Amino acid sequence: MKRFLLLLPIASMFFAAGFCHANVVINEVMYHPEGDDGDDLQWVELFNPGPEDVNIGGWVLTNHPLEGSIKSRELIFPMDTRISAGGYLLLVNDLDDSKDHDGNCFANYWTVPTGTQVLEYGRECPQLLFDQFGDDIHLSADGQRDIDAMWYGDGGEMGSGGAAIVPSGSSLGRKPNGRDTDDPAADFAAFSHPTPGASNQSAPVAERSTWSKIKMLFR
Ligand SMILES: [Ca+2]
Ligand SMILES: [Ca+2]
Ligand SMILES: [Ca+2]
Ligand SMILES: [Ca+2]
């Protein structure tokens, strides 16, 4: 009995930590924007379906498996980046064309719900690009182990078993929103109305854009 009582707090700490981390998912990906020769219009939506805010400061998002560390293709989240319970964080290559002033940017094509947190990464992490024929995306808290991963098309470095590729202009999103069985082929579907910063659904997001922009401060 004594031993059981001693183990209980340790077990509950373990579950609390696991719960906190395991809940953030790569929820929607725009890897093949319509009419975009560059990559300014690519974006990735993260979703926290859990009941607690999650601090993802120092976490890593990459387009290659973690054991083959390639720093130039790794986005490291600024310290104290938080995703609220039930909330979204949108990662955008070029939010408002401040990256390269070529007239091509996220804000020209999409709106997001008021107050959406947007992290712009294209300038600081220019090699984080997603291949239109297939790629893999990994989210990790420690740079060693995936919290979540998804792959599509030819699967990039993950190979088979990925989600089916989508027509240009459509996004690839978890359907229903947040569904995660660790089987991208089953969890993801094409959305002809992408919903950056909002629940994946078949209708467009009507609300006008305002965002709080988080700049990458290092790399
Ligand atoms: Ca890859
Ligand atoms: Ca641009
Ligand atoms: Ca998963
Ligand atoms: Ca969405």
Image: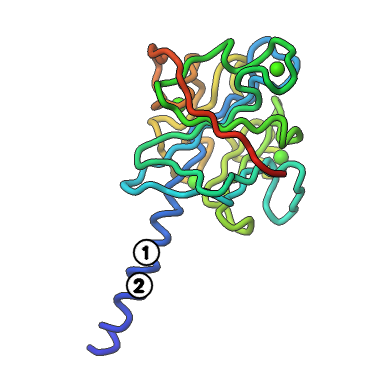
- 79 sits left or right of 154 in the view: left
Tell which residue pokes out farthest to the left in this image: 1
Which element carries disc 2, helix, strand or loop? helix
Residue 82: percent from left, percent from top: 46, 44
Using the image as rendered, state which of residue 211 and residue 132 is in the foreground.
211
Using the image as rendered, state which of residue 7 and residue 150 is in the foreground.
7
Q: Tell how many labels.
A: 2
Say which residue appears at 73% left-offset and 15% top-offset.
101
- 34 sits left or right of 196 in the view: right
Q: Amino acid at mark 1?
A: Phe
Residue 72: percent from left, percent from top: 77, 43
What label does residue 15 carry, if any?
1
Residue 174: percent from left, percent from top: 46, 32
Using the image as rendered, state which of residue 125 and residue 35 is in the foreground.
125
Q: Is residue 164 visible?
A: no
Say which residue appears at 68% left-offset and 35% top-offset.
135
| For the residues bearing labels 2 and 1, Cβ distance under 8 angstroms | yes
What label does residue 153 carry, if any?
none
> Does 60 sit above or below residue 41?
below
Quarter of image, res 43: top right
Residue assigned mark 2 = 11
Q: Amino acid at mark 2?
A: Ala
